[in-house]
Image (tube, helix red, strand yellow):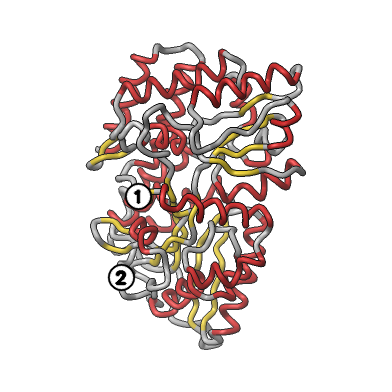
Amino acid sequence: MKRILAATALTLLAVPATAACGGDDGGSDGKTKVVFSYWGSDARQKLTEAAIAKFEAKNPTIDVEGDFSDWDSYYEKLATKTAAGDAPDVMTIEIRGLAEYAGRGILADLAGKVDTTGLDQQVLKAGQVGGRQYAIPTGVNTFPMIVNRASVEKAGEKVPDDKTWTWDEYIALAQRITSKSGGDLWGTEWNRNPAFLEIFARQRGESFYADGRLGLSEQTVKDWWALLQKIISTKAGPDAAKMNETGTKVDQAMLATNDSAFGSWWSNQLTALTTGSGQQLDLLRMPKAPGAAGSGMFLQPAMYYTISARTENAEAARKFVDFMVNDPEAGAILLSDRGLPTNAKVVAAVKDKLAPADRKVLAFIESTRNELSTAAVPPKGAMEMEDILERATDSVLFGKASPDAAAKTLLSEADAALS
């Protein structure tokens, strides 16, 4: 998928600024058609179709055509349609692609076009590029540590105070859990997700991106790799080969298969992890570096709704986006599927309908809200960064390159991608 994202970025370079829309002024029945593109699972498709049906019932002159794809093919398909001048009227995109699409004139400025008065204004800013509101967040996520308390207690250990624990304490605890399990359980799983590195860097006062470039220092990247190497060498968690086997799919997570006690995943994945494990899972703050001023954790839009700059059905498209983010009836259907809603009225209306795991996420975000900053929109070229980071990380963990050499390669490739 990361290679597809990189190819998508190249495809976008050829996108004409005059890209047209996917809908038309009206069908034979006289209704206005809006094409809405999105990705996800079968479960998301069913929820979205139910939300569309509710919108159409409330807006009988508008027809919404869902253009659904799985994650692996979504961006490739969207880039191809956009390059051909057939952009959907309403497009779902994620934070890595926002600057890329906005910079090519593909997205409409939605300031004053969609009602955003009820949305979290700080999170709303994460939909801006160059001061213009090109995107409306669907909901928010954070990237916490997730724990299976029963597994920790079975190993004779206690879940630490997440307000004070450090990276070294986390690794030592995970190592003890692995050791006491007799090979039946890893203390922690780990991953190469850029959010993990971003939190680590923020604790050191660095940003992942700064002024359109990579904001990480070589030393911070090397220290993060040293952290991963310590997890592996102490057997607090599996080696890189084992972690590669689990992939990045939540249903393969070691937390979901009860093969680890700790792990870091996006908060909106807690329900899937809980369902897989069949056990109670809880969210914790990420460990901190000694002396760190803050946790480094942040709120990030799960994804965005955007509207084509060339849609012929702008008013209908705006009504649909407004419904999806502001209408409690839409919220009651979608719940936390696209992140927890940022509209306070929608949250209040759906709170009791949320799954127990989602209520935990909501409570966690509310309790840590004053500690969480808001994610900044990455610059153009960010679609390639996850692939660049993974290659460099693997080169270190598999012993193919020294941390010094790999860090230099990482920064060089990042400069090229973001230039």
Q: Is residue 94 above or below residue 62?
A: above
Q: Quadrant of residue 179?
A: top right
The image position of residue 275, as x and y in percent, is 73, 47
The image position of residue 104, as x and y in percent, is 29, 55
The image position of residue 15, as x and y in percent, is 32, 54
Measuring 76% from the left and 17% from the top, which residue is drawn there? 182
Of 335 and 148, the residue lying toward us: 148
- Name the residue that disc number 2 marks: 111
Q: Quadrant of residue 180?
A: top right
Q: Is residue 230 left or right of residue 386?
A: right
Quick one: quadrant of the C terminus?
Answer: top left
- Name the residue that disc number 1 marks: 12
Measuring 56% from the left and 56% from the top, which residue is drawn there? 362
Kindly report the distance in space between the C-alpha atoms of the residues bearing marks 1 and 2: 24 Å
Q: Is residue 175 above or below residue 376?
A: above
Q: Is residue 142 left or right of residue 360?
A: left
* Three-letter code for the amino acid on which mark 2 is drawn: Ala
The image position of residue 315, as x and y in percent, is 40, 80
Q: Quadrant of residue 177?
A: top right
Of 69 and 413, the residue lying toward us: 413
Mark 1 or mark 2: which comes first in sequence? 1
Q: Is residue 16 left or right of residue 383?
A: left
Q: Residues within 10 Å of mark 2 (few under 14, many from 20)?
A: some
Q: Secondary structure at mark 2?
A: loop
Of 208 and 357, the residue lying toward us: 357
Measuring 58% from the left and 14% from the top, which residue is drawn there? 234
Q: Is residue 220 above or below residue 114?
A: above
